Image (cartoon, rainbow, N blue to C red):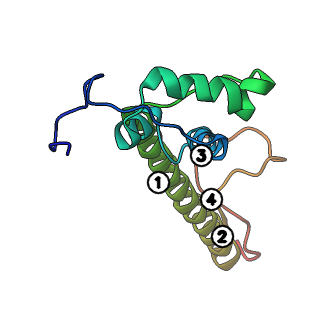
Amino acid sequence: MKKPGRSMSTTDRQHRYFSEEFKRKKVSEIDNNTTTVSEVSREYEVTRTAIYKWKKKYSRHQKQGVRQIVEVKSDTRRISALQEQVKELERQVGQKQIKIEILEKTIELVEEDYGIEIKKKESSGPCSGSLITRKPTGGR
């Protein structure tokens, strides 16, 4: 009986046979990133070299000539943090856009109600030096 935490030596290990179906399943799990070579190696007490041989033989990526890149957990965390930061910045941009629209509508309403020009119109000529100019109100 194997003691916990102790790996089997070559003399303790008996010759085991893994079916082709089992190997294909484990390689598929590795290809789909549901498990890793190290996890399969530890769980079934198979050398990593043997698992890489299985991958070479059964992996759909190997047959297509595709290299599988496994991200380090720190990279995955960093990517997640950056995605969260992008979401937050998009939210802030959305809030700023709403604020701009409210301010523009407020300026438009003030110009209509009080008859003053606050925002320079694109078609108007150069400014006469004052930012706020009153429109003529008839009597004066």
Which residue is identified by label 1? 88
In this picture, residue 9 sits left or right of residue 17: left
Per the image, label 3 sits on a secondary structure element best described as helix
Give me the residue at 69% from left, 32% from top: 59
Q: Are the two marked residues, 4 and 3, in contact with CB atoms closer than 8 angstroms?
A: no
How far apart in space, not on screen, are marks 2 and 1 (Cα)?
Answer: 26 Å
Mark in the foreground, 2 or 4:
2
Q: Quadrant of residue 125?
A: top right
Q: Earlier in the sequence, mark 1 or mark 4?
A: 1
- Give the label on residue 22, or none: 3
Question: What amino acid is found at the position of numbered circle 1 in the picture?
Answer: Glu
The residue identified by callout 2 is 105
The residue carrying pointer 1 sits among few (fewer than 14), some (14 to 19) or many (20 or more) residues within 10 Å by Cα, namely: few
Q: From mark 3 to mark 2, how far is it between C-alphas?
A: 67 Å
Earlier along the polypeptide chain: callout 3 or callout 2?
Answer: 3
Instruction: Identify the disc placed on residue 118.
Output: 4
Q: In the image, is residue 81 above or below residue 102?
A: above
Q: Position of residue 8 (x, y in %)?
A: 25, 31
Image coordinates for residue 12, horizontal then vertical, percent:
26, 30
**Sequence-first disc among 3 and 1:** 3
The kind of residue on which mark 2 rests is Lys
